[in-house]
Amino acid sequence: MCSSDLVTIERRAFLSSLALGMLAAPLSAAEQPVGKVYRIGLMGLDSAEAPGHTALRQGLRDLGYEEGKNLVIEYRAAEGRYDRLPSLTAELVRLKVDVLVTNSTPGAWAAKQATTTIPVVVAIIGDAVAAGIVPSLARPGGNITGSQFHFPDIMAKRIELLREVVPRLMRAALIFNVANQAVGPALTAMDRTARALNVEIQPIEIKGPQDFDVALNTIGQRRSEAVIVADDSMLRSHGQTIADLVAKRRLPSIGDQEYAKDGGLLAYAVNRVEVWRRAAVFIDKILKGANPAELPFEQTDRIALLINLKTAKTLGLTIPQSVLVRADGIIQ
């Protein structure tokens, strides 16, 4: 082989290796292939702007998930109408989301009936075992996990708190959504506590906002001396209306944190914002490969007592010091 042929071969080898090197070179940031984009289905019983939903998004951002980059949230809003849950949840299932997120007993039941394969995170539920959502908190065993609080205990505690604030309390109306399956066990616990305190619980069923005026009249007819508002997405979405109606009767009342902020006297309830933020941790674990069947339900201890002193003043009530010192928050 002559020297000119050798030069030609070496030149070809050099050009070939250069081309291969160019093909193997790292892409610029603009040319990088798009990474995994996760899709979450959020079945909201409240409005999209609910504090809990905002907290969930913040929790996801803290864990590195950002909408428009590596996260898409498909949102469906039932807005307190439980009859819409099955169809809206089915929509999210058809989208083949990576994780389905919901809350409350009605929301969890809709998810349980809609899918057995897509992982489900229940941000907050009253009692997952009693409601039949999972057989065990330690090992849920299916596709559903999340956080729960013992709803019956909290509802019973609300009677005790009202009795402390109104020592002569004899009759308390209970406003609840008849469509919420969590109410049954709560009524049993409340009845037990009420009998021990010699307080009569007067249940008033609510199906929707159209029943509020009737409920107000019923409270008057039964000579109720206080009002207890059960935790419920539909009732929560009309908290201001309920608080205003109760104010017309000049009655002390107790509900969740949103209700106290709307004008109710007291709140003894789960810190829903913190629990929703915690739901992001469950989502993150599942997206990273965790099996929801092996993710224990968490029992939340984020329960707070709020007192609306402005409402107390309007009602002419003095909150006992024994209650004030236990308050987690005061609304002036």
Image: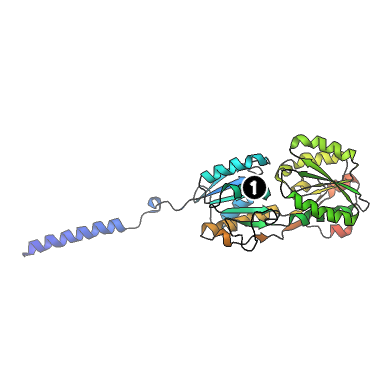
Q: Position of residue 43 (x, y in %)?
A: 61, 46
The spot of residue 115 in percent (x, y) is 56, 49
Front residue of 112/210: it is: 112
- Res 208 → quadrant: top right
* Count of numbered badges drawn on the protein: 1
Q: Residues within 10 Å of mark 1 (few under 14, many from 20)?
A: many
Q: Foreground residue, 57 or 287?
A: 287
**Percent x, y for residue 100?**
57, 50
Position of 223 with respect to 127 (left or right) is right
Q: Circle 1 sits on which residue?
A: 107
Amino acid at dot 1? Gly
Mark yes or no: residue 330 visible: no
| SS of the residue under disc 1 | helix
Residue sitting at the far right = 168
Along the viewing direction, whichever of 55 and 288 lies nearer the viewer: 288
For the rendered model, the colour scheme is rainbow
* Rendered residue at 61%/52% (across/down): 56
User: How far from the left and from the top, in percent, is residue 306?
Assistant: 79, 53
Residue 243 falls in which quadrant of the image?
Answer: top right
In the image, 109 versus 246, the foreground residue is 109
Residue 170 visible in this rendered orientation of the protein:
yes
Left or right, 200 with respect to 135, comes to: right
Quadrant position of the N terminus in the picture: bottom left
In the rendered image of this protein, does residue 313 appear above or below residue 292?
above
Q: Residue furthest left?
A: 2
